Amino acid sequence: MENENLKTENNKDYLLPASIVIAALLIAGAWIYTAGLKNIEPKKSSQELGKIAPNIENVKLVSADDHIFGNPNAEIKIIEFSDMECPFCKRFHAIMKQVINEYGDKVAWIYRHFPLEQLHPQAKKSAIASECATEIGGNNAFWRYLDEYVNLEEITSEASFSQIAENIGLNRNQFKTCLNSDKFNDKIDSYIQDAANSGAQGTPYSVIINKNNKKTSINGALPFEDFKDQYGETQKGVKSLIEEALLN
């Protein structure tokens, strides 16, 4: 889970033991990367401050305005709050594709932006770029754009955004016009607020919702299968969490 990998001599000051989470599994069942979390809060107006205490139950309902991959009427819905620049999110992207391949119409994958600009200066612009792809090419274009983006090792400039759009068949000039506008700023900000209200402290942060509206959080880039943590304890992977949601 990425919210912090601060490279300072005083890094220990930022470690919050209660917030240590699984960030990535480098070799299945062999080695887990963990990171301390230091909350990154979205900007709020004076009217918003203190009104909503973060809680998973606050997550907004899935609607037709969401980016949905798979069956919109699936028994299980997984809402992923993600930063397109976050390396752990890129790893989790592959896990979620594995979920869809494994469960088919039983699971719907919903993607919501949670750009952490304090860590990734281009994160919000990347999110806006994906929204422009959606406006021009629809929901399928969003997912194609996202796939292309996460497979790139590095985005060197905004020209890369337009090149991805062209690669997936979108009009480059139309895309650039959209990218240079402010039309999606409020939409991205609403996603950020939704993430914060729902308890997100870093990325990726996901919420599993079953047919009975029971919600379970996935903190970080959990592997698909169960795994051993750094203390040798068995922890549930994404597959086990989904299986539990299907039964409850």
Image: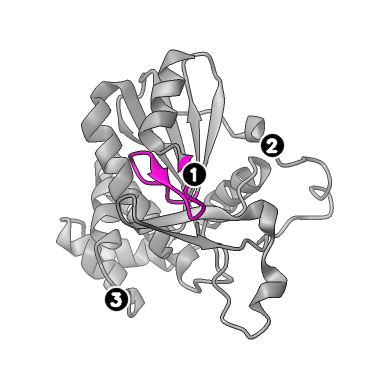
Question: Nearer the N terminus, badge 3 or badge 2?
Answer: 2
From what the image shows, is residue 99 above or below residue 42? above
First to last magenta residue range: 220-234
Q: Residue at x 42, y 68 (%)?
A: 180
Q: Residue at x 39, y 52 (%)?
A: 131
Q: Is residue 221 left or right of residue 34?
A: left
- What type is the residue that disc 2 sits on? Asn
One can see residue 65 in this view? no
| Along the line of sight, the residue nearer the viewer: 44 or 35 | 35
Q: How many labels were placed on the picture?
A: 3
Q: Residue at x 68, y 60 (%)?
A: 39
Q: Position of residue 28 (x, y in %)?
A: 30, 51
| Circle number at residue 55 | 2
Q: Position of residue 248 (x, y in %)?
A: 49, 14
Secondary structure mostly seen in the magenta stretch: loop
| Along the line of sight, the residue nearer the viewer: 61 or 158 | 61
Q: Is residue 20 left or right of residue 171?
A: right
Q: Position of residue 158 (x, y in %)?
A: 35, 75
**How crowded is the residue under tag 1: few (<14 C-alpha within 10 Å), some, or many (20+)?**
few
Marks 1,3: beta carbons within 8 A: no
- The colour mode here is one colour
| Circle number at residue 233 | 1
For disc 3, the marked residue is 159
Question: Nearer the N terminus, badge 1 or badge 2?
Answer: 2
- What type is the residue that disc 1 sits on? Glu
Tag 3, which secondary structure?
Answer: helix
Foreground label between 1 and 2: 1
